[in-house]
Amino acid sequence: MTLRTDGLVVRHPGAAAPSLKGIDLEFPDGSFTVLVGPSGCGKTTLLYCLAGLLSASEGRVTDDGSVVDRPDPRRGMAFQRDILFPWMSVEANLLFALRARSVPARERRGRVRELLAAVGLSEKVAGQQPNQLSGGMRQRIGLARLLAGEPEVMLMDEPFAALDAQTRLRMQDLVVDLWSNLRRTVVFVTHDVDEAIRLSDRIVVLGDGEVRSALDNPLPRPRPADRLADLDGYSDLRRRLHNELGSEAEPNVHPIPIS
Amino acid sequence: MGGDLIPDVSASMSRAVAGFAIGADAGFLIAVLTATTAAGRAILQPVLRLFAPIPTIGLVPLAILWFGLGEESKVSVIALGVFVPVWINSHAGLSTTPADFLQAARCLGASRWHTLTRIVIPEAAPDVVAGLRVGAAMAFVLIVVAEMTGTTHGLGYRIYQSQLFSQADRLIFCLVVLGLLGAVVDQLLARLTAPVTRWAAQER
């Protein structure tokens, strides 16, 4: 059930250079891969190809041997914005996903309760509208809706970029918990180096539409946020990532001089 | 005219309601076709684009030629006048569903029908309602025109009678009644449709 890309090239119409220039990657079952790279390097394009939302100009994406040419709930996607449907209550958002997968009507209510519990929310939020909720809550519900599709692969496109630092760390914990409980394959896009180090088994650095390197993450789990820097191998991995990424992904490296 | 008011109002309102119901249903259904199907976009839309700018008032004589002086011609003129704004607004709403909503629905495995009924139509509801409200206002304009001939009841008929007999007070009274009815109907529509438009007001 391995997800893989072979010689994946994507050209956007009208663009001079391809967005992806021949990507060969394998995402083994149950692995947690984080894609990092500067803006415009093709991370999101690659993720959309894995989802089946974008098609390959050359090469291909295969999921368990069959070519990916359209989206499928087997490969659940979490977007940069949470994209909850604002005209539906929280419960209706989850029911939408369950119905799309043809879960029998009598099982749906129970599944909604389970899904909310899985992302650490009480049943009380079921009747609320998405715009009554905080950003963190909305992302939790977005995750619950993704889980409603019972995905084998979870594709996540910088889902926590818009959240405050504390909420973000809690959401990272939640994703790691879900991943270790459910043993799904995760492909997670971020441009936060610490987020990449905290979450991943393997970090793939993309640059200019190509894979620059794939680094295995040797840090032991669990990886508490406040002691991340004390874990064996942290500084070494971080240094290697910085070298791969150059200065553009980490503005802190070159603070703006105060004149 | 005290005794005439109720029959006049009910005659006009029943024509307006019948015309509105036909025009609004047709406008919405055609909009679903023109906004969401390739055939609708390719065939129906250009035809309707040409047809929409024709002033409905100009169609009154044609309606009389085709449908005679009876109720059909009055109702069909009102229906046509309601159809155009409902179709145009609904089409605008239905054809501009944000791509990320559609992508999210596709990733969850939703069928086309499920996506249309749960995503595309609810997302367009505020535009559809805007079209319905313009259509309702249009229905009141067209009542007056449609009741010019071929009837002995209705506010439009009463307005022409008042003009004929130089009864400005009666004429103004009828206009005030039309204005009040229009305002009440608009508010009623806004309240009835509030459950499907509330989300958009809260998003802003």
Image: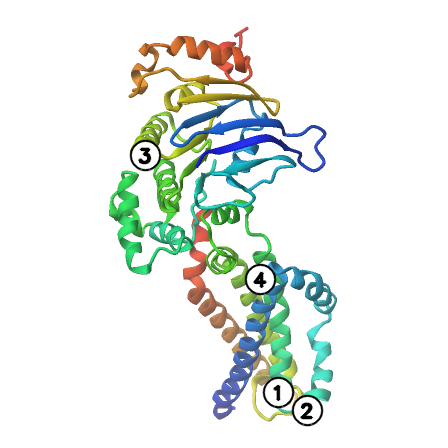
Q: Are marks 2 and 4 on the same chain?
A: yes
Q: Is residue A255 visible?
A: no
Which of label 2 and label 4 is nearer to you? 4
In this rendering, is residue A14 above or below A41? below
Residue bearing the label numbered 4: B90
Which of label 4 and label 3 is nearer to you? 3
Q: Relative to A160, is A109 on the left or the right?
A: left
Q: Give the chain letter at badge 4.
A: B
Q: Are marks 2 and 1 in contact (CB under 8 Å)?
A: yes
Q: CA distance from mark 1 to mark 4?
A: 26 Å
Q: Are marks 3 and 2 in contact (CB under 8 Å)?
A: no
Residue bearing the label numbered 3: A178
Which amino acid, by three-letter code, is at mark 3?
Answer: Leu
Residue B68: which disc?
2
Q: Relative to B166, is A254 on the left or the right?
A: left
Where is residue B73 drawn, in percent x and y?
A: 65, 86
Q: CA distance from mark 1 to mark 3?
A: 64 Å
Where is residue A243 drawn, in percent x and y?
A: 52, 10
Q: Are marks 3 and 2 on the same chain?
A: no
